[in-house]
Every structure is written in C-alpha cells, then in structure tokens.
Image (cartoon, rainbow, N blue to C red):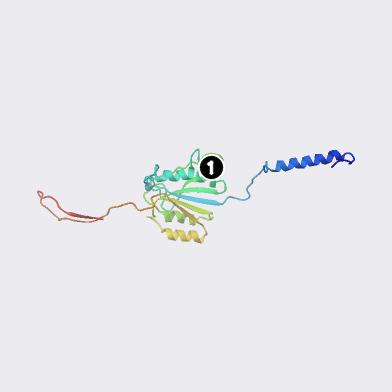
Amino acid sequence: ETEGMSPPWPIVLPALRAIAVALMFAMLPGPILSRQWLSGSLADIIVLIDESSSMLLEDHNQSMHRSARAADWLFGDSDRPGWLAGQSQNFHVQVFGFGSCDTEPTGLRTVWDSAKQPSGSPVRLDLKTDGAVTAIGEAMGAVARRSSSPAALVLISDGQSNAGTSISDAADRLRDRNIPVFAIGMGRSDEPNDLALLGVDHPNSILATDVFQGTATIK
C-alpha cells in the first residue's frame, strides 16, 4: 500500500497502524489507574442489638449462643468478613445495645461506630448479656427521636418486647420519618414447650401425723 509514495509516508503510515493496534490491546484490560472520592457525608445505618440475658441461650442444633451468633454475623472472622465490614465502606454504621443492666430502659449503649474505627483494623464488639427485660419499643423510639433520620434501622433480638412502650407505636413514628426497619430474629422460629401450674387443691390444715395429699392441675 505504500508503494509509489514519497518519503516519509512509506515509514509513517505503518508506524501509525502499529501504534493504533498497540493502543487497542492496551484498552482491553480496562483502566489501570482509578481514583475514588467522596463528596458530602455517608448515610447512617443504625443497628440495635438485644443485650438481655436470654441472648445467652443456645438453640437446638446451634453451636453458639444467640449473642455469639449475632456477633459472628456482624463481625465475621479472619477468613470471612462480617456484615459490618461491608456496610461500613458505603455507610456510617452505628451499633447500639439495649436492655443491659448498664443502660436505662429508654436509652441506648454505644457498642461500635464505623466513624471511630481505624481504617483496615478489625471490627470488635463489646456485647453484654445481663439485661432482665427486652424493651424493643423503647429502643426503636430512641432512634425515632434522633434529630437526623438514618437510612435504615437493623434490629437484632431473640424475643418479644416485655417492657416499655409498644413496638407498634415506635414503628409508627419510624414510618412517619420514612425510616425502614429490618428485623433479624436470633431465637427459635417456633414456641418452646412450656408448663403452667393452673392450680393446687389441698386441705388448709392437717394433723402432724397425717400424710399431706392434694391435686395439682398442670397445663
């Protein structure tokens, strides 16, 4: 194709073709240098975790108690990063405990904050399991009263709310502020078998030499 051309075109045209082919092959692997930056602040995700004593129970076919399973899902291990490690890359994640003896019924205890976690260091959770009540509604209400609305609320618990305000009232306040709630149950999916003493029929008094007799009704 370069026959009959005057210099320097017999050399320039093949050189241009070679450069074009080299650039095409260089573009196939994708960009070599990339840069990522953040404009503004990360959206918040609030995690509420139950710290009542029932979180120490071990369920059937489970090798860890409920609190340990929750920490394993959030934290992971050396071979498997937990949920917090992935979410903290794109969100400001805060973990709060509720129901422990160190926490007021209407308050939350700070467990972990991604903004205070040094980059690249492992996530560590200081979970307690000494609470006597499970006040889920109070914990949800504390989030609803925050001045800023988080992008989502993640609730981790093993039981029903048995103290404080109702869950439905707190859920209504969160709904009014457009805060979605994701509940994660750590207990059994079915109700455990239980016994209840309905009554005892017995004489009010007997002689010291008599044998005590009565009837107990158990459900």
Q: Residue at x 47, y 48 (%)?
A: 96
x%, y% of residue 9?
86, 41
For residue 11, above or below residue 167: above
Quadrant including the C terminus? bottom left
Element class at badge 1: loop
Marker count (numbered) = 1
Quadrant including the N terminus? top right
x%, y% of residue 113?
51, 45
For residue 176, above or below residue 116: below
x%, y% of residue 209?
9, 48
Q: Which residue is mark 1?
A: 117
Disc 1 packing (10 Å; few <14; some 14–19; many ≥20): few
For residue 165, above or below residue 63: below
Q: Residue at x 79, y 42 (%)?
A: 17
Q: Residue at x 47, y 61 (%)?
A: 172
In the figure, is residue 196 to the left or right of 27?
A: left
In the figure, is residue 129 to the left or right of 30?
A: left
Q: Nearer the viewer, residue 162 or 65?
A: 65
Q: Nearer the viewer, residue 49 or 8?
A: 8
Q: Nearer the viewer, residue 6 or 185?
A: 6
Q: Amino acid at mark 1?
A: Gln
Q: Residue at x 52, y 48 (%)?
A: 93
